[in-house]
């Protein structure tokens, strides 16, 4: 590998944590091949765009980025351009028609082939590898972004086919990773000093693996096994994303009984209207979602529940949209990700063109959704004023001439604390003395 010693790679990652985690795996494999990571695209010999297709906007970003890199190739023909992630999985070799300067298209399920594919690209070949794979993994080398939190994928793919969503087409069917590989990855991250492990999957609750003696292991079993790791000192465990009706009593009990598992659930609701939920092909109604939330709230003290909502789904009436706003408020959801509906090719809802909501209307609904979300956050944060909470410090920064540390509570609230010392990676007790819309203000106790 001596000849590659000084080559540099730049990866631009769009989209969700699964993509960020894939980027860490790509960096790991490329580093092993002798590539060096650079933050400066102009210095890179290999440029990778790791794409997201959840909405048109994210897809457009990917195309405009390779357009820019394609121009660089005119004066630097030696640079190589790779296109990975969810858009790659969709367009496959068609990308070469649109962007002939791209050297490699690699699908989401072919990540493990990267070293071999890069060697072929190095040799001057143009390559596309996007077939679906039945494997959830191979033995990856990982080069994690140094931080406090390590993202550990435990499953990939989705079998739900919500009518608006592209993910089942880009990430394939649900596949769980081997229990042993997950445990080894978690232990490695902890040994490297990471203080928080977030288990990642499109539907984490669908995890099913086999333990050392061939016994079945579900998400609760996995959380318990990780919770029992004690040779690396204190750390926290989180998991995202949960499908509402997959949250079991066993999982709630696990969150309550495992000291390292944090009081935080991310449970996308998507709409607060029964008719829209049906059209979205979600398998619950508003009342069922409410019951799940209330059940968690009564059983898990100080729990944070966050959600996702879509504004302007095809055919959504003003009244149905209002139901979403009312539900968000009524449930006092702590925070929600919001988006205007974006038609995605291949999905069922994208065919309901005659029911599409005009762009201006979607934008206007999204603004109202965001305002309700903001109000919910204010209410959620105010509850904690006067309380003392444990914060895991993630940052040490200078804000307008003052040194400030910041980090999250167990229930995922961001807290800013004036402090002269760099306490990154430390668990500190903090008295909450004020609240802003998106974060809490505290002082060390
Ligand atoms: N698996 C998770 C969500 C994954 S996608 C779940 O079941 O909820 C992340 C979020 O993107 C979704 O929750 C949804 O709110 C949003 N989203 C997905 N497709 C979308 C589309 N076509 N237009 C707008 N938002 C979309
Ligand atoms: Fe998309 Fe629905 Fe699967 Fe979530 S559950 S990834 S929204 S299809
Ligand atoms: Fe985007 Fe793919 Fe994630 S579509 S949100 S990068 S799973």
Image (tube, rainbow, N blue to C red):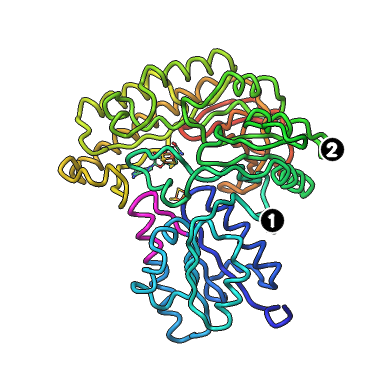
Queried on whether the Cβ of the residue with tag 2 lies below 8 angstroms from ligand 3, the answer reads: no
In the rendered image, residue 86 lying in the magenta stretch gets the answer no
Mark 1 vs 2: CB contact within 8 A: no
- Please count the marks in the image: 2
**Percent x, y of residue 352:** 21, 43
The residue positioned 35% from the left and 29% from the top of the image is 372
Q: In this view, does 159 lie to the left or right of 163?
A: right
Q: Is residue 33 above or below residue 132?
A: below
Q: Nearer the viewer, residue 415 or 228?
A: 228
Q: What range is drawn magenta here?
A: 51-63
The residue positioned 60% from the left and 65% from the top of the image is 113
Residue that numbered label 2 is attached to? 231
Q: Assign the C terminus to one quadrant of the image.
A: top right
Determine the residue located farthest toward the front in the rendered image: 214
Residue that numbered label 1 is attached to? 139
Q: Is residue 172 left or right of residue 432?
A: left
């Amino acid at each position: 590998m001596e000849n590659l010693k000084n080559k540099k790679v730049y990866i631009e990652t769009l989209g969700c944590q699964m993509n960020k985690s894939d980027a860490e795996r790509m960096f790991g494999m490329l580093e092993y091949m002798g590539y060096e990571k650079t933050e400066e695209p102009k210095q890179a010999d290999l440029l990778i765009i790791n794409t997201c297709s959840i909405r048109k906007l994210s897809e457009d970003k990917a195309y405009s980025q390779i357009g820019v890199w394609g121009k660089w190739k005119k004066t630097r023909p030696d640079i190589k351009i790779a296109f990975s992630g969810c858009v790659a999985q969709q367009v496959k070799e068609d990308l070469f028609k649109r962007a002939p300067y791209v050297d490699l298209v690699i699908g989401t399920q072919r990540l493990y082939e990267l070293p071999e594919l890069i060697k072929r690209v190095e040799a001057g070949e143009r390559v596309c590898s996007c077939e679906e794979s039945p494997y959830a993994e191979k033995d990856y080398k990982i080069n994690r972004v140094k931080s406090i939190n390590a993202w550990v994928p435990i499953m990939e793919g989705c079998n739900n086919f919500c009518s608006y969503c592209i993910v089942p087409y880009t990430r394939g069917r649900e596949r769980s990773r081997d229990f042993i590989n997950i445990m080894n990855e978690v232990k490695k991250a902890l040994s490297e000093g990471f203080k928080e492990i977030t288990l990642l999957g499109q539907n984490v609750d669908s995890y099913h693996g086999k333990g050392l003696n061939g016994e079945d292991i579900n998400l609760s079993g996995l959380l318990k096994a990780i919770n029992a790791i004690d040779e690396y000192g204190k750390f926290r465990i989180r998991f995202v994303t949960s499908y509402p009706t997959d949250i079991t009593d066993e999982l709630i009990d696990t969150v309550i009984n495992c000291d390292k598992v944090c009081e935080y659930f991310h449970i996308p609701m998507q709409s607060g209207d029964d008719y829209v939920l049906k059209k979205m092909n979600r398998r619950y109604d508003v009342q069922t979602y409410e019951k799940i939330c209330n059940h968690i709230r009564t059983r898990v003290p100080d729990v944070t529940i966050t959600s996702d909502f879509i504004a302007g789904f095809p055919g959504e009436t003003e009244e149905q949209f209002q139901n979403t706003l009312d539900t968000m408020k009524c449930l006092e959801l702590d925070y929600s990700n919001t988006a205007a509906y974006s038609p995605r090719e291949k999905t069922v809802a994208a065919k309901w063109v005659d029911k599409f909501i005009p762009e201006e209307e979607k934008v206007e609904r999204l603004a109202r959704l965001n305002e309700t979300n903001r109000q919910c956050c204010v209410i959620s944060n105010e509850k904690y004023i006067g309380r003392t909470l444990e914060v895991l410090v993630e940052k040490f920064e200078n804000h307008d001439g003052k040194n400030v540390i910041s980090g999250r509570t167990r229930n995922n609230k961001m807290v800013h604390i004036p402090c002269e010392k760099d306490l990154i990676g430390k668990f500190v007790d903090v008295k909450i003395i004020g609240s802003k819309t998106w974060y809490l203000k505290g002082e060390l106790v």
